[in-house]
Image: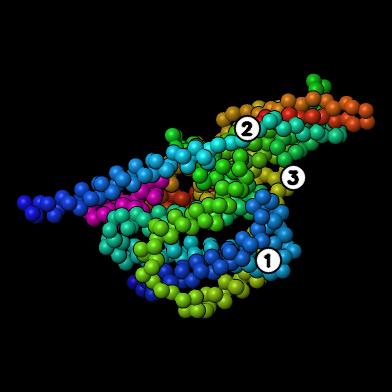
């Protein structure tokens, strides 16, 4: 009887400690993760590009690549839809290429080849025509 | 073969790794006193180019940290080759393997903190891989990375404090048994200082039309796999199986043998993937 008690006691202790640890972790974990996950809501950000692009030219910002054409200007996000790396525009090939895993996109953001599976995000672009100041206003999502 | 084994086992890998850790901690603290996580790349460039002895301290931190990881791996290899892993309690062994994983995360967050082309891409990739984990991925990302929303805030806090504390908790029972003085290995200290003086630690600014970014050396295999397989399988499942196999090594009988064969096979596959990635450069 005593022998049985000595063999089952450590297991009971271990289980009790495990339950207590799990309960404490859950109690502290929830407020911790709620705290960490909170984000201050952001307004959409506007970027002014104060130059007019000639046909075929482009403007590369930190977050987007801007083009202009007969149907109006457009801007594609530089965030690759595979794993978020910052893509680059290769003027020579007319392609947007991710330097991390070489996903390729057309200038309109259309996916050409993976490993990405989705097209690039497009941003709203307006022409800026205010007196001497000419160019574009690109609205990035918040 | 026996000669190679004797030679390998005669080296005191564990002691040397602790000396490398000391140097990594001291130099890391020095670099942190100048580093500004709000402008990581600008700050590191200034440390590297303008600050007196900045290149030396940063180099010492970089090389000592890399060496600490490599020597820890060699130490683990020696323990396994000697068959001593079977003597460990499974929970203790698990904690030490987890500590090695945390060391890898410390190295990785160090890369991310550079804020250069490689660091930024590494951070974003880690964030997206973590987010691919069902249920807890979001929370884990908020805890470890959140690079796209919080920039270097979380990574910096984890690199400086969080991961270090976790590492110490996991390895304290093992670590406290060994009293190693930094001057017990003067040649190692001198060699590291010499390398830090002569060779600058890497820093890669973003270039227009950059076609290829190479990740940290230990993630090259993963980078290659991510080209072929979706993030959850390549970035979560594949590495986790290796971690589990390592944890199960001390088991006796078939389970231990299967874990050993799987670990060896995994390493072989990873080495091949790494070679592919290097070949692409």
Tag 2 residue: A41
Q: Is residue B242 magenta?
A: yes
Tag 1 residue: B54
Residue B30 shown left or right of residue B1 in the figure: right
Specify few, some or many for label 1: CA neighbours under 10 Å numbering under 14, 14-19, or 20 or more: many
Q: Main secondary structure of the magenta part?
A: helix
Give the structural element (helix, strand or loop) at label 3.
Answer: loop
Tag 3 residue: B208
Give the structural element (helix, strand or loop) at label 1.
Answer: helix
Which residue is located at x 67 percent, y 66 percent?
A: B55
The subunit letter for the residue under badge 1 reads B
Depth check, front residue: A112 or B116: B116
Depth check, front residue: B32 or B103: B32
Q: Extreme top residue here?
A: A71
Which residue is located at x 61 percent, y 48 percent?
A: B152
The numbered disc on residue B100 is none
Q: In the figure, residue A119 lies in which quadrant?
A: top right
Of discs 1 and 2, which sits in the foreground?
Answer: 2
Gap between marks 3 and 2 measured at Cα: 32 Å
Span shown in magenta: B240-261
Does any portion of residue B275 appear in the rendered image? no
Q: Is residue A37 magenta?
A: no
Q: Is residue B185 above or below residue A64?
A: below
Contact, CB < 8 Å: mark 3 with mark 1? no
Specify few, some or many for label 3: CA neighbours under 10 Å numbering under 14, 14-19, or 20 or more: few
């Amino acid at each position: 009887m005593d022998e049985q008690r000595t063999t089952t006691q450590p297991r009971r202790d271990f289980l009790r400690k495990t339950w207590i640890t799990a309960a404490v972790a859950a109690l502290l974990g929830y407020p911790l993760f709620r705290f960490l996950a909170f984000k201050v809501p952001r307004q959409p950000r506007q970027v002014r590009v104060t130059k007019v692009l000639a046909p075929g030219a482009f403007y590369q910002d930190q977050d987007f690549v801007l083009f202009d054409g007969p149907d109006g200007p457009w801007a594609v996000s530089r965030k690759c839809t595979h794993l978020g790396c910052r893509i680059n525009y290769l003027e020579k090939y007319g392609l947007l290429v991710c330097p991390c895993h070489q996903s390729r996109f057309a200038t309109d953001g259309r996916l050409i080849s993976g490993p990405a599976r989705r097209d690039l995000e497009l941003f709203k672009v307006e022409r800026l025509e205010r007196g001497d100041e000419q160019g574009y206003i690109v609205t990035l999502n918040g | 073969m026996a000669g190679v084994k004797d030679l390998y086992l005669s080296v005191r890998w564990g002691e040397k790794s602790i000396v490398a850790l000391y140097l990594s901690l001291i130099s890391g603290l020095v670099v942190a006193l100048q580093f500004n996580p709000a402008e990581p790349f600008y700050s590191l460039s200034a440390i590297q180019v303008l600050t007196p002895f900045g290149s030396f301290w940063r180099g010492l931190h970089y090389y000592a940290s890399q060496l600490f990881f490599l020597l820890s791996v060699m130490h683990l290899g020696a323990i396994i080759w000697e068959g001593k892993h079977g003597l460990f309690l499974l929970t203790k062994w698990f904690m030490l393997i987890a500590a090695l994983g945390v060391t890898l995360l410390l190295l990785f967050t160090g890369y991310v903190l550079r804020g250069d082309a490689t660091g930024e891409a590494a951070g974003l990739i880690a964030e997206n891989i973590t987010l691919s984990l069902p249920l807890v991925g979001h929370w884990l990302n908020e805890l470890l990375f959140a690079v796209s929303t919080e920039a270097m805030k979380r990574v910096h806090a984890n690199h400086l404090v969080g991961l270090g504390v976790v590492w110490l908790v996991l390895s304290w029972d093992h670590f406290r048994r060994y009293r190693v003085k930094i001057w017990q290995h003067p040649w190692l200290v001198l060699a590291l200082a010499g390398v830090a003086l002569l060779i600058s630690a890497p820093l890669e600014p973003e270039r227009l039309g950059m076609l290829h970014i190479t990740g940290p050396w230990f993630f090259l295999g993963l980078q290659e796999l991510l080209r072929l397989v979706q993030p959850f399988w390549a970035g979560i499942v594949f590495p986790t199986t290796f971690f589990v196999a390592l944890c199960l090594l001390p088991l006796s009988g078939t389970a231990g043998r299967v874990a050993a064969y799987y670990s060896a096979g995994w390493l072989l596959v990873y080495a091949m993937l790494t070679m592919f990635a290097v070949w692409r450069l």
